[in-house]
Amino acid sequence: MTSRHSRRTFKNIEGLLATEGADWHDVVRTTCYLRDMSRDYEPFNEVRMAFYREKGLDFFPASTGIQATLCREDLLVEIEAIAIVPPDRRAR
């Protein structure tokens, strides 16, 4: 897995969060699905921790990592994120 794949996934989530008036500070939980856990977890985790630090997160979201067959053969990682956005910041 290249760091480019993981980073792009985190940036895609960031864009989705922004459409709802949220950001990574609002994410409370992630589930990270990796095609090959033994091969990909360490580099994925390095990218994830660097991304979280870059965003200035005081607390990292709770997270679960799962090895899975993903919906498309070309995917190496899929991330599900749950965010709690205060009502005054929700997109209208």
Image: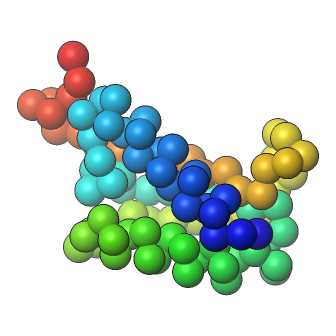
- Residue depicted at 16% across the width and 38% down the height: 86
Which residue is depicted at the point 23% across and 24% down? 91
* Image quadrant in which you'd find residue 53: bottom left
Task: Choose between 51 and 92: the one closer to the eye.
Answer: 51
> Is residue 46 at least partly visible in the picture?
yes
Query: How far from the left and from the top, in percent, is residue 21?
Result: 24, 34
Residue 67 position in % (x across, y down): 79, 63
The answer to whether any part of residue 82 appears in the image is no
- Quadrant that contains the N terminus: bottom right
Q: Is residue 55 left or right of residue 44?
A: left
Give the residue furthest to the left. Answer: 88
Relative height, residue 40 to residue 25 (above, below): below
Q: Which of the 4 image quadrants contains residue 62? A: bottom left
| Most distant residue in the front direction | 4
Q: Residue at x 71, y 69 (%)?
A: 2
Residue at 75% x, 74% y is: 40
* Front-lying residue, 22 or 4: 4
How many numbered callouts? 0
Quadrant including the C terminus: top left
- Report x, y in % for residue 12: 51, 44
| Along the line of sight, the residue nearer the viewer: 1 or 90 | 1
Q: Is residue 23 above or below residue 19?
A: below
Furthest toward the right, the residue is 73
